[in-house]
Amino acid sequence: MPVFRAGGTLGLNGASWVATEVGVNYAATLAVLVILSFFFPLVVRIANEYGVPETVITIAVLAALTFLVSSGIIRWRVGRHRTDLERLDTARAQVLMDPEDPRAYYVDGEHLAQMLLKLDRRREAAQIVDRYACLGGARESEIVALREALTRTEWYRRRNS
């Protein structure tokens, strides 16, 4: 799984961060963790001999754990977002190949409009729902559910703004 490093431009309201892919060396990460787990008791003992209180050491360890947990969560979220974008690209390609087939709007049981709503692209999702509603083989219950999801998203957006 790749790691992402900031740099360049994202193009989102002039923000200056973009995720660029960098390879992860899991063996090196594991080696660092093994070394840290081996040396930690030794460092605590040496620090106590020099008069460093255990609370300072505990706070430092908790800060390091917080950093590790947050970096893990960020990696998970970035990976999930990449997967969502890949599924979105797959759905768009299916719709471009056969725009008259209602099944082309689904990838892994999820509708293209639902994917767009998850990525906060309401306008594009509304266009997809309208196009899907015009298809002959689309079920009315699916169309109603998609329109309700659009309405809910708009309601939440207005309520939170």
Image: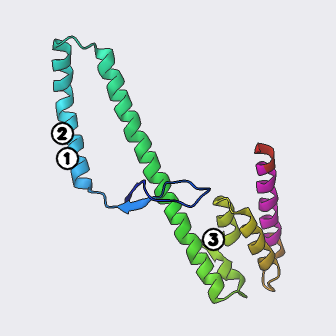
- Mark 2 vs mark 3, foreground winner is 2
Q: CA distance from mark 2 to mark 3?
A: 45 Å
Q: Sequence-wise, which precedes: disc 2 or disc 3?
A: 2
19 relative position to 27: left or right: right
Q: At 21% from the left edge and 21% from the top edge, which residue is drawn?
A: 44
What is the magenta range?
A: 142-157
Is the N terminus in the top left, top right, bottom left or bottom right quadrant?
Answer: bottom left
Q: Position of residue 41 (x, y in %)?
A: 19, 25
Q: Are marks 2 and 1 in contact (CB under 8 Å)?
A: yes
The amino acid on which the numbered mark 2 sits, given as a three-letter code, is: Ile
Kind of residue at badge 3: Gly
**Where is mark 1, residue-wise?**
31
In the foreground, 73 or 18: 18
Mark 2 and mark 1: Cα distance apart in space: 6 Å
Question: Is-magenta flag for residue 149?
Answer: yes
Where residue 106 appears, as percent x and y from the top left, is 65, 75
Residue drawn at point x = 79 percent, y = 55 percent: 154
The reply, left or right, for residue 61 in relation to residue 120 is: left
Q: Residues within 10 Å of mark 1 (few under 14, many from 20)?
A: few
Q: Assign the C terminus to one quadrant of the image.
A: top right
**Which residue extends farthest front?**
14
Q: Amino acid at mark 1?
A: Ala
Q: Which residue is mark 2?
A: 35
Q: Secondary structure at mark 1?
A: helix
Q: Are marks 2 and 3 in contact (CB under 8 Å)?
A: no
Residue 1 in view in this figure:
no
Please say whether residue 36 is one of the residues in the magenta stretch.
no
Please name the predominant secondary structure of the magenta segment in the image. helix
* 136 relative to 60, above or below: below
Most distant residue in the top direction: 51
Q: Which residue is mark 3?
A: 109
